[in-house]
Image (tube, coloured by chain):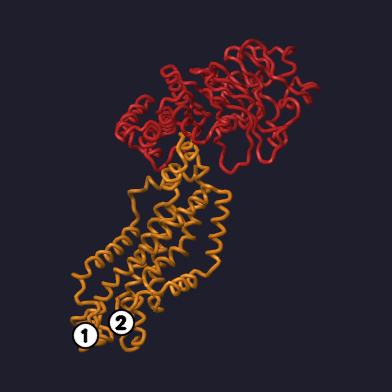
Amino acid sequence: MSVAGTIAAAQQRWRRIPVVAGIGFAIILAWVVAALAAPWVAPFDPIAQDLSATLQPPGGSHWLGTDNFGRDVLSRIIWSARIDLQMGVFGVLFPFLIGTTIGALSGYAGGLIDTLLMRLLDVTMSFPFFVLIIAIVATLGPGLISFFIALALVGWVSYARLIRAQFLVMKEADFVLAARCLGYGHARIVFRHILPNAIMPAIVFSMSDAVIDILLGSSLSYLGLGIQPPTAEWGVMIAEGQTFIASAWWISFFPGLAIICLAIGFSMLADGFAEHFGISE
Amino acid sequence: MALLELKHLTVAFGKGDLTNPAVDDVSFAVDAGEVMGLVGESGSGKTVTCRAMLRLMPPGLHHRISGQAIFDGKDLLATSERELQSLYGKRIGMIFQNPSSYLDPLSSIGQQIAEPLIYHEGLSRRNARARAIELLRQVGIPDPRHNVDAFPHQFSGGMRQRAMIAAAVACQPDLLIADEPTTALDVTVQAQILRLLMELRDRTGLAIVLITHDLGVIAATCDTVAVMYAGRIMERATKGELIRHPRHPYTAGLIRSQPSRARKGRPMPSIEGQLPDVNSLPKGCRFHPRCAYAEPLCRTGVVATEPVGSDHLVACVRWRELEFAA
């Protein structure tokens, strides 16, 4: 009753999306547009070197300055958005799909299947998250694909736990009994009746997870395990600017600001959703 | 032959012993077009009986079921799950006490009524929607064309119950199990819902098992009645016979303790004591600790269900001596 009631009440408020979520969505949308329109928006080629204009401070034709190879920082940041958004989206997508499937199966089936899957989850969780990611990426070789594989292998646990908990509650909900009474098969009950009611906490979590994935991707690039130079990526840019942090702060500072900006966008969207659907993270 | 025949249904919970189970040796039969009332106090095992018979016990609850539930020649307790799924929603419908929690909060009323039609009868989305509107009209929802797209939270309790009935009877089932369908509703709405169920019975020949604790509801609707107490059937008879000539002290007590029979200035008649706990059910007749007529045999002996007349069964060792005024 209370679960159904909460959702029904949430639904009533569907039209009143909180302002926070709106701002978060606008920030993300702005980055998506910038990433898609990078060839037209970015004033310079992101990897073209101009050795006559190295380490230029912000201002003039290079709004955010240039790095030690004379590459335009603003252009590199805009092009980077393509990669960093990918990290946020795909870094969440695969763990989300895998975790949701495992969590739903585990919670709905119960018994031996549940026990086995939950022990698998325990094993995965017993390793420190970052260390495991770094180990997998280091084994597979640096790059975006390795990063996504590592996240898929490790990141599903949070989603599995969230979804499983929801399923444990909801499989005994009255409307699920009603669905059984109407003779629906298990697949239909799981996907059409329980999942839509159970998925919201996982969606909210995926927003903050996207932030973590972007930061993680940037960190890996910084460590040399992610995107390889000369491709522009915020983490790579911060790493490259490190040497010049005292003299040319803008090389690292603006990519850092970009990460923070996108992360805040996702966080605000997550907060707005959570508030809207009455879910506490 | 009866449409549904329940034979010796026994349900034990957990590792509980089958010698004194929660639901013990329950048998009854329902013919096509018949309305059978299953009456008893809260906790007497009415709902468990029906859910066990349909194998719809809550998941994760340890229980053992024995007996037979023969619906149209098939034993529901022995058939495959797939077979059950092909019966439920199509030939057996169910409605419940609290319609608000039994409707999916994220699907519109129309979707929920159309879904069994699409799933069981292969109707197209468009035809199923048209049928849903028609069904909403039949169950008395105002402005069905508009309300078909409403969500459960936008409906009142009575309207939700009507919507649930519409979904349950969408595929024109032969049997409807109604588990306290009017308990959560106020009296006027209650009467409307009962009238609706009777109309459906008259129009489609639907058989109804009506679970209730309200003798008033029984009196208004049922053809036959089974009185249940602590997991056993105490008495079974046609409605008129049962209300005029109850032979079991419990039935007589239930009839006597109806609020409408109370006299001004006198205490409300009631049955002393409380329903026993499932884990410590009394031996002998389960009603004996509360029975004014109990004698030593009631405490120990096996109580046989004996026929009083052609349509009247009673499970009381003293039924021959006892007469109750109506």
Q: Who is closer to the viewer here, A164 or B280? A: A164
Q: Specify whether A261 is left or right of B297.
A: left
Sort mark 2 into few (<14), some (14-19) or many (20+) by Cα contacts within 10 Å.
Answer: many
Q: Colour of chain B?
A: red
Q: CA distance from mark 1 to mark 2?
A: 15 Å
Residue A241 position within the rendered picture, expressed as x and y whole percent measured from the top left: 33, 83
**Marks 1 and 2, the one that precedes in the sequence:** 1
- Numbered disc 2: secondary structure: helix
> Which hue belongs to chain A?
orange
Task: Residue B223: give x, y in percent of width and height.
Answer: 54, 16
On the image, numbered disc 2 is attached to which residue?
A251
Residue underneath mark 1:
A50
Between B317 and A120, the one lying in front of the other is: A120
Q: Residue at x 63, y 34 (%)?
A: B65
Subunit ID for the residue under disc 2: A
As drawn, B17 above or below B292:
below
Give the quadrant of residue A247. Answer: bottom left
Callout 1 crowding tier (Cα within 10 Å): few <14, some 14–19, many ≥20: some
Can you give x and y, in whole percent of width and height, for residue B303 in the image? 73, 22
| Residue at image point 75% right, 16% down | B318
Q: State the residue at coordinates (46%, 27%).
A: B91
Residue at 67 percent of width and 12 percent of height: B308
The mark closer to the camera, 1 or 2, is 1
Asked whether B66 or B154 is in front, the reply is: B66
Q: Is residue A194 above or below residue B209?
A: below
Q: Is residue A274 visible?
A: no
Q: Chain of mark 1?
A: A
Looking at the image, residue B79 lies above or below residue B255: below
Q: Are marks 1 and 2 in contact (CB under 8 Å)?
A: no
Question: Can the viewer see residue B238 in this picture?
Answer: yes
- Residue B262 horizontal/vertical position (percent): 61, 20
Tell me the amino acid under the disc marked 1. Answer: Asp
